[in-house]
Amino acid sequence: MKRVRAKRYNKLVRDNIPALLARKGLVVVASRLSGGKLRRALREKLIEEAGELSKARGKKEVLNELADCSEVLRAVAKAEKVTMAAVERVRSAKHKKRGGFQGAFFLKKVQKL
C-alpha cells in the first residue's frame, strides 16, 4: 500500500477552507484557536498577507491582496476587542498630526547639524 505524504500548513486559514478541502476528498486536520493563540496567529497571518501584497503584480492582484489584508485586519481588531471605528479615529488623528503617504517621501538619512 502506497503511503500518502501529508502537506503541513500550520497557519490560520479562512473559515470555509477546511470544508472546501474536505469536499474535494482531502483529509483535513484542523483545530480552533482562541485567546492569545488566536491573536498571535492573526498577527502572523497579517504579516503573511502583507508579504503577498508586496509581491503582487497588476491591479487585480493588488486588489485581491488588499482585500485579504483588510479581512485579517478586521479579524485582528475583533480579537483585540477594538472596533474598526476606533481604528479609523486613531488613523485620522495620526494623519492630522503626522500626515499620510500621499507625498511619497522616502527618508534616506538624518544627521545632526
Image (cartoon, rainbow, N blue to C red):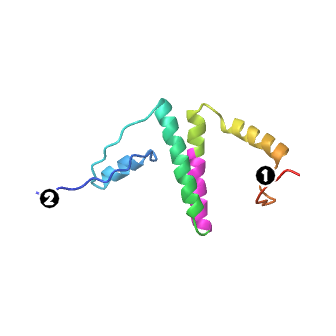
Q: What label sits on residue 90 in the rendered view? A: none
Q: Is 9 within the magenta?
A: no
Q: Identify residue type, mark 2.
A: Lys
- Left or right: 70, with 102 as reference point: left
For mark 2, give the secondary structure.
Answer: loop
Residue 112 visible in image: yes
Identify the disc placed on residue 100.
1
Magenta region, main secondary structure: helix
Determine which residue is flagged by label 2.
2
Residue at image x 17%, y 55%? 3
- Mark 2 Cα within 10 Å, few/some/many (few <14, many 20+)? few
In the rendered image, the vertical position of residue 61 relative to residue 35, given as above or below: below
* Distance between the alpha carbons at the discs numbered 2 and 1: 57 Å
Amino acid type indicated by mark 1: Gly
What range of the chain is rendered magenta?
59-72
Residue drawn at (78%, 52%) of the image: 100
